[in-house]
Image (spheres, coloured by chain):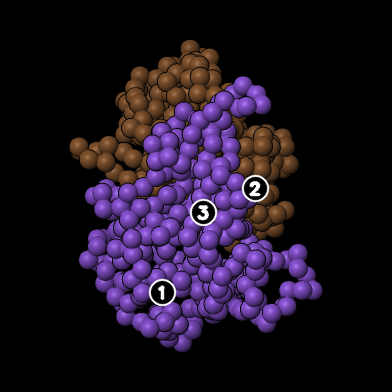
Chain colours: A purple, B brown
């Protein structure tokens, strides 16, 4: 099964949805996205991933995805490298219902070599001109997992801040599961429908999960919890045993994401601080 | 590790100042976080107030608050003209031709200016790095690319183990043969400035950082770079610009751990990373 993962780096990662995938032990997954971040590393650490296709696998200043790195280096997970534009273009083709989309990127690179070998890119001469152009195969995930700012009961969703690759990924996917900071009654956006980032036409299910992106940020709601990102990275870096303990303490040892949040922040002081920090930045 | 004195710019700060000088007038530049972002912000506040920044995650023309550590950090989205998507930034602006200059880092840069941020061969095995991010797209499609990086021998091999982002590929005419547009490339390090264009296709040292020598550059480069006959010396920043960088743009020295009295976070000055 191919899973399209939303979020980017330290922003709006679908952590609550991914914790649930780990609890249900849904395995043999192919993960696809532009920047694959914490959600991917958690899935790799839990042993649920066979293959990944991505523009990058890291948390920028906070380092590479260490579980993913170990799995790629040892060969337990395979990968097809893309650039961000290449994957975004593949989602765009999927979203438009066409088999491929052209691009002028990737030419001459080893990324293109690997994508051609994997059968997801090819090279032709521009039929309307003369220069070479890369054709990128539509990417149609079986399911997309995205955390949004707000949604209504029908699945109409608002994303505040950048939307990275997510809108086209959702439009391309066969099914989409959204988590939202807040789920509002049907019709909540009818006064300003132009604010809807993702139409319910593309959404299969929506679930309310406050702080569902923690420890990553949700623009206008809360800042990212740097110390929790760094703590995960330290554990992931030090090895599989250490990250397995993290999974036990933070994911599989809890019945719900709310339990995990409560265990890490019993009185809610950290979450309140993250909200205040965001407010000060707006 | 050397501690920067209060009055003069450190070698890594000099990279930022020389990076900023590559931005003129009303340039539109695409930057990641780190030294490239600081270079863009310096240019805006010092000599190029009309310069505009694009961030690959979809942030268009922001006014940045200190100090973003990510391309999706709320601090980098501050007062943007639009918060859009990756396809808008890398497709609608970069591929469409609306971006003048792209700034990049890179774990390896070879003699032809190719960048590797994907796989490094080491001790008979392979070490995995983050991958391209938007770097391949920026290097493929921007006509001017500026690479900011520390100058270490392992970072400058003769040939990259893997070409993530194209410079001149195999040398003069390499880009043309692959179907890529022309490129003017500048690599700015803590030792020197190297340049290449489609005619030469190969990195040539054109300027030295204050206090460094050609011997230093040669000793810390994995190939024999061409050396310009009329070598320039990179200018030191004005005190006011140094204060701007230190007090306003990165007041907690998040990108200059060498300037902090004690390291509170386990971070290196330069993580090996792609564009995002």
Name the residue carrying label 1.
Answer: A20
B167 is higher (above) or lower (below) than B61: above
What residue sits 27% from the left and 37% below the top?
A: B121
Image coordinates for residue B130, horizontal then vertical, percent: 40, 47
Please say whether residue B39 is visible from this viewpoint.
no
Q: Which chain carries label 2?
A: B
Please report contact status of discs 2 and 3: CB closer than 8 Å, yes or no. Answer: no
Q: Which disc number belongs to residue A140?
A: 3
Q: Which numbered disc, 2 or 3, marks the residue closer to the eye? A: 3
The residues bearing labels 3 and 1 have C-alpha atoms spaced at a distance of: 22 Å
Which of these two is toward me, B269 or A256?
A256
Q: Nearer the viewer, residue B72 or A76?
A: A76
Give the quarter of the figure containing the C terminus of chain A: bottom right
Where in the figure is residue A180, as x and y percent of width and height?
A: 57, 74
Q: In this view, does B166 lie to the left or right of A94?
A: left
Name the residue at 32% across, 45% down: B128
Which image quarter: residue B97?
Answer: top right
The residue at which mark 2 appears reads as: B88
Q: Is mark 3 on a helix, strand or loop?
A: loop
Q: How crowded is mark 1: few (under 14 residues within 10 Å), some or many (20 or more)?
A: some
């Amino acid at each position: 099964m191919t899973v399209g993962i939303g979020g980017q780096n330290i922003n709006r990662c679908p952590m609550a949805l991914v914790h649930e995938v780990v609890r249900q032990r849904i395995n043999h997954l192919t993960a696809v996205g532009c920047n694959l971040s914490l959600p991917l590393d958690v899935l790799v650490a839990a042993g649920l991933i066979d293959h990944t296709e991505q523009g990058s696998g890291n948390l920028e200043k906070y380092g590479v995805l260490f579980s993913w790195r170990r799995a790629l280096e040892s060969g337990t997970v395979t990968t097809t490298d893309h650039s961000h534009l290449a994957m975004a273009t593949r989602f765009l083709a999927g979203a438009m219902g066409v088999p491929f989309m052209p691009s002028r990127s990737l030419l001459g690179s080893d990324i293109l070599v690997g994508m051609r070998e994997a059968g997801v890119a090819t090279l032709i001469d521009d039929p309307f001109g003369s220069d070479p152009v890369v054709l990128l195969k539509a990417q149609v995930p079986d399911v997309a997992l995205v955390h949004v700012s707000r949604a209504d009961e029908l699945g109409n969703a608002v994303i505040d801040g950048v939307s990275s690759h997510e809108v086209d990924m959702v439009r391309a996917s066969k099914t989409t599961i959204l988590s939202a900071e807040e789920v509002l009654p049907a019709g909540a956006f009818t006064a300003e429908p132009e604010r809807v980032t993702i139409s319910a036409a593309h959404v299969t299910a929506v679930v309310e999960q406050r702080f569902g992106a923690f420890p990553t940020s949700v623009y206008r709601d809360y800042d990212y919890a740097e110390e929790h990102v760094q703590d995960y990275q330290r554990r992931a870096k030090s090895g599989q045993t250490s990250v397995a303990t993290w999974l036990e303490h933070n994911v599989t040892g809890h019945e719900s994401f709310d339990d995990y949040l409560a265990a890490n922040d019993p009185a809610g002081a950290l979450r309140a601080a993250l909200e205040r920090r965001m407010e000060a930045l707006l | 590790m050397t501690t920067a004195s209060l009055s003069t710019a450190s070698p890594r700060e000099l990279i930022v100042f020389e990076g900023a000088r590559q931005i003129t007038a009303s340039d539109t530049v695409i930057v990641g976080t780190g030294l490239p972002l600081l270079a863009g912000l310096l240019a805006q506040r010092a000599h190029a107030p009309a310069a505009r920044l694009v961030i690959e995650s979809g942030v268009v023309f922001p006014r940045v608050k200190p100090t973003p550590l990510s391309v999706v950090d709320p601090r980098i989205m501050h007062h943007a003209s639009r918060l859009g998507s990756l396809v808008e930034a890398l497709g609608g602006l970069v591929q469409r031709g609306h971006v003048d200059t792209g700034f990049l880092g890179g774990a390896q840069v070879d003699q032809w200016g190719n960048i590797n941020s994907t796989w490094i061969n080491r001790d008979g095995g392979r070490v995995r790095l983050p991958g391209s991010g938007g770097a391949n797209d920026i290097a493929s499609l921007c006509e001017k690319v500026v690479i900011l990086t520390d100058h270490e021998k392992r970072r400058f091999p003769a040939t990259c183990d893997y070409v993530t982002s194209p410079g001149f590929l195999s040398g003069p005419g390499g880009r043309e043969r692959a179907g890529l547009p022309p490129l003017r490339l500048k690599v700015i390090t803590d030792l020197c400035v190297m340049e290449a264009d489609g005619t030469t296709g190969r990195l040539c040292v054109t300027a030295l950082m204050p206090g460094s020598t050609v011997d230093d550059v040669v000793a810390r480069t994995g190939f024999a770079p061409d050396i310009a006959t009329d070598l320039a010396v990179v200018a030191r920043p004005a005190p006011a610009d140094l204060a701007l960088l230190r007090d306003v743009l990165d007041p907690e020295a998040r990108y200059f751990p060498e300037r902090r009295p004690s390291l509170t976070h386990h971070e290196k000055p330069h993580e090996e990373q792609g564009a995002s």
